[in-house]
Image: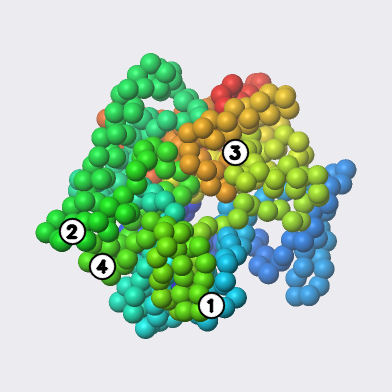
């Protein structure tokens, strides 16, 4: 209840179906639901709800799909399957703690909160430091009798405005994303910059990090030393660039002010054990509470409906399985994965990824050899493991490297990725939105009519 996107509305819509009525700047869950219903009607999509895919079986022509619907089994044949279940459909991470069986309060996750009134009068401990944990701790203020926020390590939180400038003007234009270290740099200028001028790149992110630290500390201005000490607990000690991934969170408006005012008490520690009426932390302190909310993310994506040999490929790594172009696994035929390539410009990323998959399915895009694709996947995975703080979906996601990723896919399809040209100033400094990718499919069709040979992916790792 009350949850809103981190994205702004101009980023989060289908490129050929803009919002029919203007939503909130950061659309609410209800507004997104209503938009999806209207999009399904407008595009006349065959959406079958309450059809649970239980088994996907390979056959000589593709896949046999077995679904459960209204307690009845249904079977259909398909030549190709695209799995779009995303990163976060698995159960929430649920560790087991010493003594939890004697705890007389509730242990819940954010998915259990259907009404904020559930917090009324409670003593709440929120465990985790992702977007859900920050939101839930902030939502609880004004309802709960006390709010404690527990985390092993504070992460970088992105404010909505950086020195008064909306964060999208920093992270959603070419200038900001060209400075982003990535496993792939699709232009010659980017490759030169990151190979020979790394001091410029690292200096840029050091400057941004210093600004974010300054803005955080500003919440302690005029406060006592205890307020400043609480703010210091949520101040990350590591470099900003390593946190720019799938778990990057926009800080809720009131979170830091609630920390400064003591309405949220932060604890840089882990839950060690439970007592009858509270928890014991790794630093030896105890917190009386009757609700413990575990906001510790989802497990690594699972695919229980796939044949066992494919499940082993996809489920055995704790950070997820790297895919070629973040879309296909070369050892799983007639199948692709879309939406797992999650990035900051999420919906256009899915659309361009789907266009790439369609080109492959139609035989218009000729893939490299299996060994070449596996090598590409391994190189990409190695870079992520070295340069990004790990999380259960790290291998699948493109996160803040969405621009580099989109550029590679579009170049694979022989479509210009520079959507604001010939206005060079807009291309470099104006934020990209979903509208910039409108017409990609029509552009692709026009080029294919004139093209004689097949397309081939660039020899770039992604």
Mark 4 crowdedness (10 Å alpha carbons): few <14, some 14-19, many ≥20: some
Q: Which mark is residue 225?
A: 2
Q: CA distance from mark 3 to mark 4?
A: 43 Å
Q: Which of marks 2 and 3 precedes in the sequence?
A: 2
Q: Identify the residue position indicated by label 1 in the image.
A: 103
Q: Nearer the viewer, residue 254 or 328?
A: 254
Q: Which of marks 1 and 3 precedes in the sequence?
A: 1
Q: Which mark is residue 326?
A: 3
Q: How is the image coloured?
A: rainbow
Q: Residue furthest bottom?
A: 121
Q: CA distance from mark 3 to mark 2?
A: 48 Å
Q: Which mark is residue 262?
A: 4
Given contact means CB atoms under 8 Å apart, are the residues at marks 1 and 2 in contact? no
Q: In percent of the image, x 63 and y 52: which residue is there?
A: 301
Q: Nearer the viewer, mark 2 or mark 4?
A: 2
| Displayed quadrant of residue 142 | bottom left
Q: Position of residue 171 (x, y in %)?
A: 35, 41
Q: CA distance from mark 2 to mark 4?
A: 12 Å
Q: CA distance from mark 3 to mark 1?
A: 43 Å
Q: Is residue 335 left or right of residue 196?
A: right
Q: In percent of the image, x 67 and y 34: which residue is there?
A: 360
Q: Is residue 181 left or right of residue 219?
A: right
């Amino acid at each position: 209840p009350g949850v809103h996107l981190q994205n702004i509305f101009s980023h989060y819509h289908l490129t050929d179906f803009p919002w029919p009525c203007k939503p909130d700047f950061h659309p609410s869950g209800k507004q997104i639901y209503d938009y999806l219903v209207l999009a399904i009607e407008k595009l006349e999509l065959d959406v079958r709800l309450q059809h649970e895919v239980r088994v996907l079986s390979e056959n000589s022509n593709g896949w046999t799909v077995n679904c459960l619907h209204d307690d009845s089994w249904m079977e259909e044949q398909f030549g190709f399957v695209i799995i779009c279940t995303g990163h976060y459909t698995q159960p929430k991470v649920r560790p087991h703690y010493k003594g939890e069986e004697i705890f007389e309060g509730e242990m819940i996750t954010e998915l259990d909160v259907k009404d904020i009134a559930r917090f009324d009068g409670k003593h709440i401990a929120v465990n985790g430091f992702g977007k859900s944990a920050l939101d839930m701790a902030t939502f609880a203020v004004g309802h709960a009798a006390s709010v404690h926020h527990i985390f092993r390590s504070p992460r970088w939180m992105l404010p909505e405005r950086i020195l008064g400038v909306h964060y999208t003007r920093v992270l959603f234009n070419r200038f900001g994303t060209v400075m982003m270290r990535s496993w792939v740099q699709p232009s010659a200028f980017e490759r030169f910059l990151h190979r020979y001028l790394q001091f410029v790149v690292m200096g840029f992110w050091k400057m941004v990090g210093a600004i974010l630290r300054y803005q955080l500390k500003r919440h302690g201005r005029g406060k006592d030393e205890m307020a400043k000490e609480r703010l210091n607990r949520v101040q990350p000690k590591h470099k900003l660039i390593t946190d720019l991934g799938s778990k990057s969170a926009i800080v809720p408006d009131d979170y830091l002010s609630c920390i400064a005012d003591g309405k949220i008490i932060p604890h840089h520690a882990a839950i060690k054990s439970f007592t009858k009426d509270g928890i014991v932390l790794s630093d030896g302190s105890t917190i009386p509470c009757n609700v413990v909310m575990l906001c510790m993310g989802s497990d690594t994506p699972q695919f229980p409906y796939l044949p066992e040999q494919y499940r082993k490929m996809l489920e055995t790594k704790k950070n997820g399985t790297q895919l070629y172009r973040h879309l296909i696994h070369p050892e799983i035929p007639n199948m692709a994965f879309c939406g797992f390539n999650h990035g900051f410009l999420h919906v256009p990323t899915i659309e361009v990824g789907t266009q790439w998959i369609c080109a492959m399915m139609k035989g218009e895009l000729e893939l490299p050899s299996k060994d070449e694709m596996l090598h590409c996947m391994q190189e990409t995975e190695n870079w992520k493991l070295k340069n990004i703080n790990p999380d259960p979906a790290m291998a699948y996601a493109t996160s803040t490297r969405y621009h580099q990723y989109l550029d590679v896919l579009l170049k694979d399809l022989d479509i210009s990725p520079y959507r604001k040209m010939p206005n060079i100033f807009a291309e470099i400094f104006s934020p990209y939105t979903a509208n910039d990718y409108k017409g990609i499919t029509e552009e692709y069709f026009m080029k294919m009519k004139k093209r004689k040979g097949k397309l081939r992916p660039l020899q770039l790792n992604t």
